[in-house]
Image: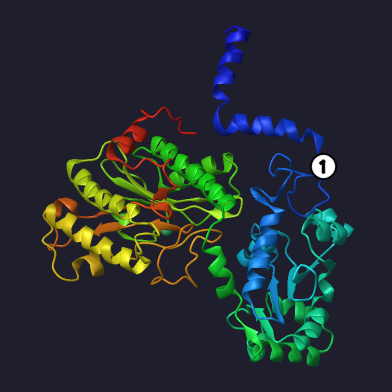
Amino acid sequence: MSLRVLLASSARHLHGPCRRYATEAARTVLSTKPSIYGQPIFQSHPHLVKPNELTAGIPSEEYERRRRALMDSLPDDSIVVSVAAPIKYMSNNIFYKYRQASDFWYLTGFEEPDSAIILEKNSSSRDYKLTLFCNGTDSDKAKWDGASTSLDDAGALFNADSALPITTFPSHLKALISLSSHVYVDLPASATPRSSRSRPKSILKYLANSLPARREYDSIMETLSGSKRKQLAPEISKFRAIKSKCEQDIMRAAADISGTAHAKTMRFTHPGLSEAMISAHFEYVCALSGSQRLAYVPVVASGANSLIIHYTSNNHIVREGEMVLLDAGCEYNGYASDITRTYPSTGTFSPAQAELYTALLSAQKSLCKLCTESSGHSLHELHRKSCELLKRELNQIGFGLQTGDLERILYPHFLSHPIGIDLHESSNFDRSGELKEGMVITIEPGIYVPPSNSFPSRFHNMGIRIEDEVLVGKEHATVLTVNAPKEIADVEGACQGLLGLEPF
Ligand SMILES: [Mn+2]
């Protein structure tokens, strides 16, 4: 092979994410290594963060707007206390990859552990004051773990009125609590003053570690547990439920990465592979495209394993003639994605598989279209509709459903959940509230047919779920996860390599 042919053929292989990374890598030559900051910012990582952005895809002003909107919604003389997530350990001192606490990140964009903020209402010209507490420069720590952002840089970059050492957080908090009428803070579930004595964590850790006198610690805890204290999470969740244009763009990018990974994983799959290899392939494709982690442990359920809704053992071999249910999505630049597809291991649905798939798909597509503000629907109403639609569809293909068959056996889970920074942004979400423009929710009906005489035998042991993310508009619903093949022809085309996609 001549050199020219060799070059041409290697260039052909440099496609998709690999080519993008090659270009980005070239740009990073200008920045110095190692970084002096505790997270990627434009100055250190111009291949990840643009000049106007604080975190990838989100400008500083947006973080400012978030804090202002929150503080404007709270009564006078309020303070907000939010702390970073603790580092989590697999065993002893073996840590997991760090992920910042969602609400803290939403308000700050700050990605280092051992940090906290206090927001005070009505105490400066911009109506609120932000104090950021963090590690600051620590040369010994930097040698082992890499840099943490200096106090000066942290204050300037993250737009804080002051940035102080995290060790001073308890004394500041104590002083401010006594001056404020309302203290918005989330304590861990077990954090009553009594139980916290045995297992201090998160916010308690800072208080417990940093205060020499137990009496002082107890007095802060008592005040925090008293009538001044209000839960912060429900206040923030109202704002997080509506996605800004920047957030919508990131969520679309996350959905694109996951959707393409689904298509490529369909191409990669064949009988004889293990479910674990399919999971590994999905994760690999997402990581190549820049995703920082998966948003959850994937479900790779072949054959009758698909009847287990949260099957994550992923340790069986895929057989000829089975379907594979793949529920998997990446996290990208702080936002989760969530897609489920069910496809034939051999690349072609059997007639019975196609029949059941078509019934579910028809209902799923009708439900996606209903995700508009003008429909006035709530998640509860959409779920009720999903049951109606599925009953009709299933009876048309010979199910003859009895009362309760669908809700109790064939489709035992809820249709939808809101998604964003967290995969399930549901804990403070009102399922009875009307959908609003800018919300992003999943639509994920499923059918799981046990081998029971009550149901047609040709569908026994089939489990199918089809899940998309939908952006709610005033009049129109936008499916974000369109890269994942869904129509039978597209799914089979992807499996058979007819869509022009390489498996990698
Ligand atoms: Mn989901």
Q: Position of residue 210 (x, y in %)?
A: 81, 79
Is 359 placed above or below 104 here?
A: above
Q: Is residue 312 visible?
A: no
User: Measured from the top left, where is residue 125 in percent x and y?
Assistant: 80, 69
For badge 1, the amino acid type reads: Lys
Residue in the image at 35% along x and 35% along y: 495
Figure quadrant of residue 117 = bottom right
Q: Nearer the viewer, residue 106 or 65?
A: 65
Q: Position of residue 120 (x, y in %)?
A: 75, 75
Which one is in front, 126 or 150? 126
* Quarter of image, res 264: top left
Give above or below for 176 relative to 344: below
- Disc 1 on helix, strand or loop? loop
Color scheme of the displayed model: rainbow
Q: Callout 1 environment at 10 Å: few (<14), some (14 to 19), or many (20+)?
A: few
* Label 1, ligand 1: CB separation under 8 Å: no
**Vertical side of 415 occupied by 248: above or below:** above
Asked whether, in this view, residue 153 is left or right of residue 438, the answer is right
Q: Which residue is mark 1?
A: 33
Of 249 and 310, the residue lying toward us: 249
